[in-house]
Amino acid sequence: MSNLKKQNIQESYFLDTLLDVIYSQKLKDIIIYKGNNSLAYKNIIISTANSNTQMNGVVKKITDILKDKSSLSVEGKDSSWLLIEAKEVLIHIFTNDSRKFYELEDIYFDCELIYQNG
């Protein structure tokens, strides 16, 4: 398992699996927040991709992992901001310029930071 703070083992395994996909697709500047009571998600992942092709590769890998496709929702294909809902995890993938523009990390200021790389 990664160095994520201890969570429920099943949640941690799923989160580690998603993190492995993100690393295998060479995304960078990865941040993971633990959702708070006001959010519908247990975890929020924010990362940066170099291209739309790279973003779409992440979607394909996550789709392959999730046998139950009904628990996967994807918005923003072929744009500079890709949003993936995978079970109770929300994944934001940006291009470099979009991440700087939206500064999404500011929205999650009251969430606990549980992982950061980059």
Image (tube, helix red, strand yellow):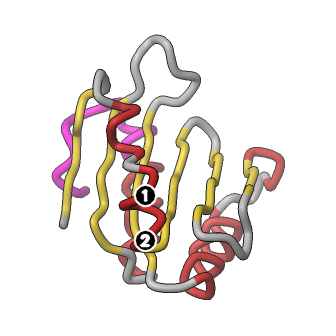
Q: How many marks?
A: 2
Q: Is residue 1 visible?
A: yes
Quadrant of the image containing the C terminus = bottom left
Q: Position of residue 2 (x, y in %)?
A: 22, 57
Where disc 2 sits, the SS reads helix
Quick check: is 3 in the magenta stretch? Answer: yes
Question: What residue would you read off at disc 2?
Answer: 97
Quick check: is 107 in the magenta stretch? Answer: no
- Mark 2 residue crowding within 10 angstroms, few (<14) / some (14–19) / many (20+): few
Question: What residue would you read off at disc 1?
Answer: 101
- Mark 1 residue crowding within 10 angstroms, few (<14) / some (14–19) / many (20+): few
Is residue 21 shown above or below 6? below
Q: Are marks 2 and 1 in contact (CB under 8 Å)?
A: yes
Identified at 47% across, 30% down, the residue is: 42
Q: Nearer the viewer, residue 43 or 51?
A: 51
Tell me: 64 left or right of 116: right
Tell me: 108 left or right of 29: right
Tell me: 12 left or right of 115: right
* Residue 84 location, quadrant: bottom right
Tell me: 71 left or right of 50: right
Q: CA distance from mark 2 to mark 1?
A: 6 Å
- Look at label 2 and name its amino acid: Asp
Q: Position of residue 5 (x, y in %)?
A: 19, 38
Q: Which residues are magenta?
A: 1-12
Instruction: Identify the main secondary structure in magenta.
Output: loop
Is residue 7 shown above or below 19? above
Residue 30 badge: none
Identified at 41% across, 61% down, the residue is: 99
Q: Nearer the viewer, residue 84 or 80?
A: 80
* Residue 80 location, quadrant: bottom right
Q: Position of residue 41 (x, y in %)?
A: 53, 30
